[in-house]
Image (spheres, rainbow, N blue to C red):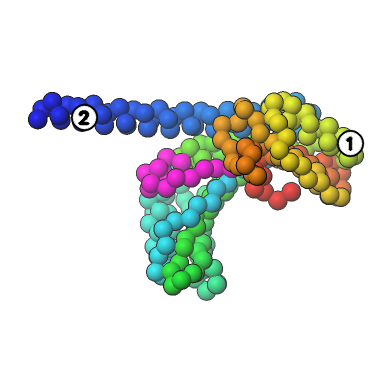
Amino acid sequence: MKKKQLITGIFLFLVMTIYLISGTDATRRSAEDYEQIIGAARQTGARPVLIQFHQSQALPSVEHAEAIFSMGDKWKRTLSREWNTPVAEDRDLTEKHPHYQIVWQKGEAKFTVKWTATFESGRWTPFLITRIEAPIEQLDQAIMWKEQWSKWLQKQRVLVKFNTCLESVYDAKLNHDQQNDRITQVLHSLEARVVEQMEDHVVISTSAYSPHISDYILTNDMKMNVQAATHVDHEKSLTRLIIGTPIITTTY
């Protein structure tokens, strides 16, 4: 009996050790991902200005939309106490798609958590949406929020994968060939293989796969984990470069 308990104990210890190591390794790889795309942008002469982390996750369905508020209230109280940070709140049950939103802000950095829901077959399906946005000068704050939130979600047994988006600028209006050249430089820096391309009179966009980015999605049965896009801001006389992993989830 004691031998069986010892074996069970060793097994549980090994499982927990692997879990903790894999969690730490995932955080390290994630850190390397945004370091990679920041470096790639700078190598083209772009000036990084804004970092975003974004995720959206469906949660177990509920019978009443009010359950979204209950969940939001509970998480808000706990997080405010654990993080010792005041929280702004926004809620609305009158819309067709109710929502509950809490926001942390420090300087220009903003961390938004939103619960919304859709109604189907007599039940509500809640969605948890997270957006962390910060100027590049507050990158450390954004990373800290992302790591704290990831640990919190692990405790809630919610599996979430973040998309990362970096916005950089060139202080000039680049022509079509110059924009294509900058995107090619980004992909070359990441040793990325082009998967698909799209362009119109406003935006040039390329999707690719890089072995230096930790995660990927499948598109037409092909791996893809980085997108790079450019567009000219004529009003401000500059060109914006957006790099997203595995996809761009911000307006461009």
**Residue range (magenta):** 150-163
Query: Which one is nearer the viewer's eye here, 237 or 53?
Result: 53
Real-space Cα separation, disc 2 to disc 1, in angstroms? 62 Å
Q: Is residue 28 above or below residue 142?
A: above
Where residue 86 appears, x then y in whole percent?
47, 50
Task: Say which residue label 2 marks.
Answer: 9
Secondary structure under tag 2 reads helix
Secondary structure under tag 1 reads helix
**Within 10 angstroms of label 2, few (less than 14), some, or many (20 or more) residues?**
few
Where residue 223 appears, x then y in whole percent?
62, 37
Direction front: furthest residue: 221
Looking at the rendering, in which quadrant would you find the N terminus? top left
Query: Which one is nearer the viewer's eye here, 169 or 177?
Result: 177
Where residue 107 appears, x then y in whole percent?
60, 43
Whether the residues at callouts 2 and 1 have beta carbons within 8 Å, the answer is no
The residue located at (74%, 48%) in the rendering is 252
The residue located at (32%, 31%) in the rendering is 16
Q: Is residue 71 above or below residue 25?
A: below
Direction left: furthest residue: 1
Res. 227 in view:
yes
Looking at the rendered structure, the kind of residue marked 1 is Asp
Residue 148: image quadrant is top left
Res. 42 in view:
no
Q: Quick check: 186 left or right of 175?
A: left
The residue located at (38%, 57%) in the rendering is 74
Query: Which one is nearer the viewer's eye here, 204 or 79?
Result: 204
In magenta segment, residue 50: no
Where residue 18 appears, x then y in whole percent?
36, 28
Q: Quick check: 54 left or right of 15?
A: right
Looking at the rendered structure, the kind of residue marked 2 is Gly
Task: Say which residue label 1 marks.
Answer: 177
The numbered mark, 2 or 1, whose residue comes first in the sequence reads 2
